[in-house]
Amino acid sequence: MENQNSHSKLKAIIGILAVLLIVSLIYIFKLTTDAKEQDKTIVEIKSEKESVLKDLSDLKNTYDAAIAENTSMSDDLIAERDKVVKLMEELKSAKGDNASLMKYKNQYKALEQKMRNLMEEVAVLKIKNQELTTNLDSTNVILEDSKKYNQVLVGQNEELAKTVEKGSKLTVTNLKTASYKVRSSGKEIATDKASRTDMLKVNFTIAENKIAKSGDKTYYVQVIDSKNNVLGDKATISFGDTSLIYSFTASVKYENKTVEVSQQLPGKDFAKGTYFVNVFDKAELVSKSSFSLR
């Protein structure tokens, strides 16, 4: 009887120990799993943090490159670049948790959008600067051509200024040139495309001058294309030591009142680019303008 009781107690103890063993194993497994998950989360957060730092570094490099170009927007670019650098320093020392990382990711996105806006403004500024440079180069070209075509035009103008009263000179204003496509019906359709253009129309105004000498006046109009070719008649006329190559002449009967002058210049195969129009009173350049065909 006693042996039977002892045997029952032993079985109970063994059962309790087995239960405790199973519970311990489950607890250890849970701790191990939690540790692995925590390690995985730490690795992922670290990876995300490094990714955001790299994105911020790329953002800084973009600003550095734009600042190096020394545009009028350099101060704005430097200010935004400094914000990026500050955020990088904060992120390096920040806590490694999801909430903190999300805050910095949102701040990065805001800085990135600001960078895109500034880069668009810089791009527009570059285009405008390039246009200014192109216009300056074109002006230098036409001035050089004027020297070739008109030789000592500036010197001659100074001589004319000494012998002719300024008040008696006629003033040419509102010099404008428009390009057209002419239909077979004769209808003129305005266009700015070189491939469609087959006629230019040059307009200018001779201002009223009560003390000027009235009578017939002849103006020499010079149209130069983007390849430095004189269009139209390409006729040459000399005024003393000065020679002028012109596209056409405009004859006007001047009676001391305002006169509107309009002249057509037909042609074909017009080149793309900037054109220059000069109006001469004999050898004197009295008006100039430019226009472009695309």
Image (cartoon, helix red, strand yellow):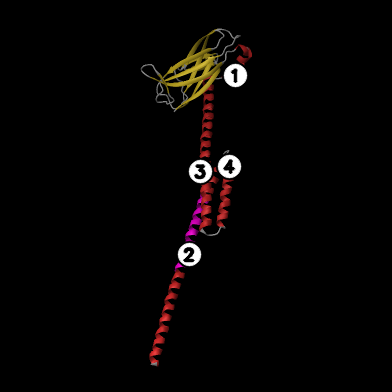
Position of the N terminus by quadrant: bottom left
Q: Name the residue under label 1.
A: 155
Q: Magenta segment, which residues?
A: 33-58
Q: Nearer the N terminus, badge 4 or badge 2?
A: 2
Marks 1 and 2: in contact by CB < 8 Å?
A: no
Q: Kindly identify the amino acid type of the residue bearing the numbered disc 3.
A: Arg
**Image quadrant where residue 11 sits:** bottom left
Q: What element carries label 2?
A: helix
What is the CA distance from the residue labelled 2 to the residue labelled 1?
Answer: 88 Å
Q: Kindly identify the amino acid type of the residue bearing the numbered disc 4.
A: Asp
Q: Which of marks 3 and 2 is in front?
A: 2
Position of the C terminus by quadrant: top left
Above or below 83: residue 18? below
Q: Is any part of residue 18 visible from this angle? A: yes
Q: Mark 4 points at which residue?
A: 76
What is the CA distance from the residue labelled 3 to the residue labelled 4?
Answer: 13 Å
Q: Which of marks 4 and 2 is in front?
A: 2
Q: Nearer the N terminus, badge 3 or badge 4?
A: 4
Give the dominant element type of the magenta stretch: helix, strand or loop.
helix
Residues 242 and 218: in front is 218
Give the percent coordinates (x, y) of residue 78: 58, 45
Q: Kindly identify the amino acid type of the residue bearing the numbered disc 2.
A: Gln
- Residue 255 disc label: none
> Callout 3 environment at 10 Å: few (<14), some (14 to 19), or many (20+)?
few
Q: What element carries label 4?
A: helix
Q: Residue at x 62, y 15 (%)?
A: 161
Q: Name the residue under label 3.
A: 116
- Residue 38 disc label: 2
Q: Nearer the N terminus, badge 3 or badge 2?
A: 2
